[in-house]
Image (tube, rainbow, N blue to C red):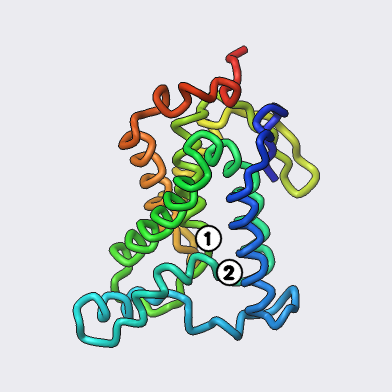
Amino acid sequence: MVDRTDEKQREPIPVLTWTIILLNVIVYLWDRKFGLFGPGVVFSDLAMRPQEVLSAINGTSEHFPLVTIFTSMFLHGGFLHIFANMMFLAAFGPPVEQAVGPWRFTLYYLAWGVFAALAQIYASPMGNVPVLGASGAIGGVLGCYFLLFPSNRLHVLIMGIWEFETKAWILLGLWFLYQIFARQDGVANWAHVGGFLAGMVTVLVIGGREAILRYHPELIEADD
């Protein structure tokens, strides 16, 4: 669990971040016929399979798999999957939304999710295992936060036992390296990497940290 220590960052209410979280939760429950655990059954055909998407791009199959690039980012494999993703989005989404503006945040979020999916397809073009989850899009949020608020202090609580405070650039930098060097079976690590890089590139393309935060100095923590 990650929490930001400054109270100022909680205003104004991050409407779009919470809307995205609510939408993910609704889809998750609906997918399980409003049960909390178990596999998804209602939207199982909306998960992305890289091989099918490539076939659709090449024109050798129907075009429906292209839709799954978008739909897959609102599906999750289980309770722990969605819980972890929504915790990260709730912790890092609000200041990013406030910095770039709510509507741009929504468009960027979707774009980061698409870029993350394409990165996973590039890394595993013949993959036929369903790829799903908001992790890639949230990776974009983390990459954006990494450049915008590197010195902000993060309060981290692991499993309700281990508690510590660290700088954002340390935690997020370690998270990024973990995706590259500690890849796990069944985890779309390259989607996470692609989303993170897309978030960083977005900050640079729209003017950089100083330009984006020019009118939001309250979001920046002073260095000790």
Q: Which mark is residue 76?
A: 2
Measured from the top left, where is residue 3 in percent x and y?
69, 38
In the rendered image, the quadrant that contains the N terminus is top right
Task: Please identify the quarter of the rendering in which residue 217 is found.
Answer: top right
Q: Identify residue for label 1.
A: 134
Q: How many marks can you see? A: 2
Measured from the top left, where is residue 103 in percent x and y?
48, 48
| Three-letter code, disc 1 | Ala
One can see residue 92 in this view: yes
For the residue pair 15 and 62, the one nearer the viewer reads as 15
For the residue pair 74 and 85, the one nearer the viewer reads as 74
Task: Please identify the quarter of the rendering in which residue 192 is found.
Answer: bottom left
| Three-letter code, disc 2 | His
Residue at 73 percent of width and 78 percent of height:
34
Residues under numbered marks 2 and 1 in contact, where contact means CB atoms less than 8 Å apart: yes
Residue at 59 percent of width and 85 percent of height:
42
